[in-house]
């Protein structure tokens, strides 16, 4: 039996801790898997909101609070950025998983899943094709 890959074990709604090379500056961050197939899509978790996001209503509409009380893998209440989903390389995810099975830190609460679906469905910042993929994956 072949060794399972991250894509075989992780699911949509998993909270993962990964190195995100395409943000500035590159950093390791918590993220929520919004879609695995046909494309791997992540929503990044941030400890605070930037002034830039706060000044843009379309971006603010996509920010959701992630309460630590419902997500004990976090150290404090945080923000889930559903306005700007990030693609992630499937091979990089599988390599991270092979090196550290502990990258999965938890799963989002049913309440947060429902909030994500609502925000994504009405998003003015996410392309329609991505909206459809995320809604299908998280529903």
Image (cartoon, grey):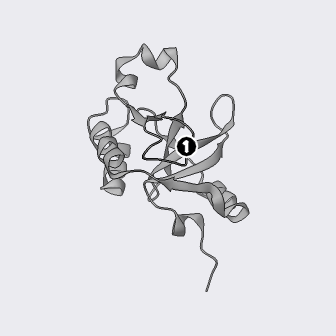
Closest to the observer, 34 or 22 = 34
Q: Position of residue 92 (x, y in %)?
A: 66, 54
How many labels, in total? Answer: 1
Q: Is residue 59 above or below residue 139?
A: above
Quarter of the rendering containing residue 126: top left
- Tell me the residue at 34%/26% (across/down): 61
Q: Secondary structure at mark 1?
A: loop
Q: Position of residue 113 (x, y in %)?
A: 34, 48
Asked whether residue 35 is in view, the answer is: yes
Asked whether residue 82 is in view, the answer is: no
The quadrant of the rendering that contains the N terminus is bottom right
Quarter of the rendering containing residue 12: bottom left
Q: Position of residue 128 (x, y in %)?
A: 32, 40
Left or right of 76 on screen, residue 129: left
Closest to the observer, 68 or 23 = 68
Residue for badge 1: 74
Q: Residues within 10 Å of mark 1 (few under 14, many from 20)?
A: some
Q: Is residue 138 above or below residue 124?
A: below
Q: Position of residue 59 (x, y in %)?
A: 40, 24
Residue lying at the far right of the rendered structure: 99
- Tell me the residue at 61%/48% (across/down): 17
- Tell me the residue at 60%/51% (across/down): 89
């Amino acid at each position: 039996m072949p060794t399972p890959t991250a894509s075989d074990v992780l699911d949509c709604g998993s909270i993962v801790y990964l190195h995100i090379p395409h943000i500035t500056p590159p950093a390791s961050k918590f993220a929520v898997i919004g879609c695995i197939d046909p494309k791997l899509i992540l929503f990044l978790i941030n400890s605070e909101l930037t002034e830039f996001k706060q000044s843009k209503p379309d971006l603010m509409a996509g920010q959701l609070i992630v309460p630590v009380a419902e997500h004990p893998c976090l150290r404090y209440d945080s923000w889930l950025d559903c306005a700007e989903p990030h693609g992630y390389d499937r091979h990089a995810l599988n390599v991270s998983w092979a090196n550290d099975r502990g990258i999965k830190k938890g799963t989002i609460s049913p309440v947060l899943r429902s909030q994500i679906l609502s925000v994504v469905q009405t998003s003015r910042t996410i392309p329609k094709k991505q909206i459809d993929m995320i809604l299908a994956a998280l529903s």
